[in-house]
């Protein structure tokens, strides 16, 4: 989708600090980090949200979760604890409609989130 911000990052049309990449996923630092580690993990293929990704019947959601964990290990936050968040829909604060997992860590994370 040419008008999608994250598709443009996949296409390298706009820059991002990429930290991890697989054949079907890409991970890059959030431009407005909410924790010392704040990385966004996306499927390279466009799906609007986690609900749509869940319906992709080809293991893509699995790949996104595996990449999220690999990022946490690489960032050194896997042992201390980290959070994986899919804001899904405007009511949950989703602002970019290309599904992305936020991987947050490196500080104490309160529960419940706001
Ligand atoms: P959402 O609110 O949809 O769950 O999360 C969107 C996230 O994308 C936000 O945390 C925001 O800071 C991040 N973001 C928005 N535009 C860009 C961008 O152009 N580059 C990067 N690296 N992050 C972005
Ligand atoms: Zn997209």
Image: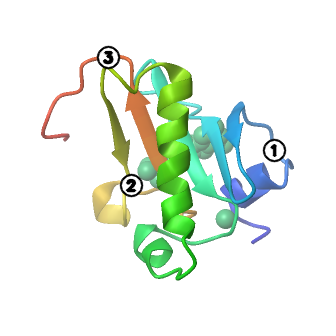
Residue density around tag 3, few if under 14, some if 14–19, many if 20 or more, within 10 Å: some
What residue is drawn where x is 58% and y is 78%? 58
Lower position in the chain sequence, tag 1 or tag 2: 1
State the residue position of label 3. Answer: 107
Indicate the secondary structure of the residue bearing disc 3.
loop
User: Any atom of ligand 1 within 8 Å of the CB at mark 1?
Assistant: yes
Q: Nearer the viewer, mark 1 or mark 3?
A: 3
User: At which x and y percent is residue 51?
Assistant: 40, 74
Note whether ligand 1 is within 8 Å of mark 2.
yes
Position of residue 31 relative to residue 114, above or below, is above
Q: Mark 2: few, some, or many residues within 10 Å (few <14, many ≥20)?
A: some
What secondary structure is found at the residue carrying circle 2? loop
57 relative to 82 in the view: left or right? right
Q: Which mark, by number, is residue 14? A: 1
* Mark 1 vs mark 2, CA separation in Å: 23 Å
Q: Residue at x 44, y 38 (%)?
A: 103
> In the picture provided, is 45 more to the left or to the right than 51?
right
The picture places residue 106, in percent across and down from the top left corner, at 38, 18
Tell me the residue that label 2 is attached to.
86
Identified at 53% across, 22% down, the residue is 75
If you read the primary sequence from the N terminus, does the residue marked by circle 2 or circle 3 appear first? 2
Give the SS element for disc 1: loop
Q: Which mark is residue 32?
A: none
Q: Can residue 100 be seen?
A: no
Q: Is residue 60 above or below residue 33?
A: below
């Amino acid at each position: 989708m040419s008008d999608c911000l994250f598709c443009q990052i996949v296409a390298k049309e706009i820059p991002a600090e990429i930290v991890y990449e697989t054949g079907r996923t890409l991970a890059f630092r959030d431009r407005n980090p909410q924790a010392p580690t704040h990385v966004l993990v996306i499927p390279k293929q466009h799906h609007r949200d986690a609900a749509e990704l869940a319906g992709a019947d080809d293991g893509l959601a699995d790949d996104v979760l595996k990449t999220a964990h690999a990022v946490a290990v690489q960032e050194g936050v896997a042992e201390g604890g980290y959070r994986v968040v899919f804001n899904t829909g405007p009511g949950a604060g989703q602002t970019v409609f290309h599904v992305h997992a936020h991987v947050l860590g490196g500080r104490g994370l309160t529960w419940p989130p706001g």
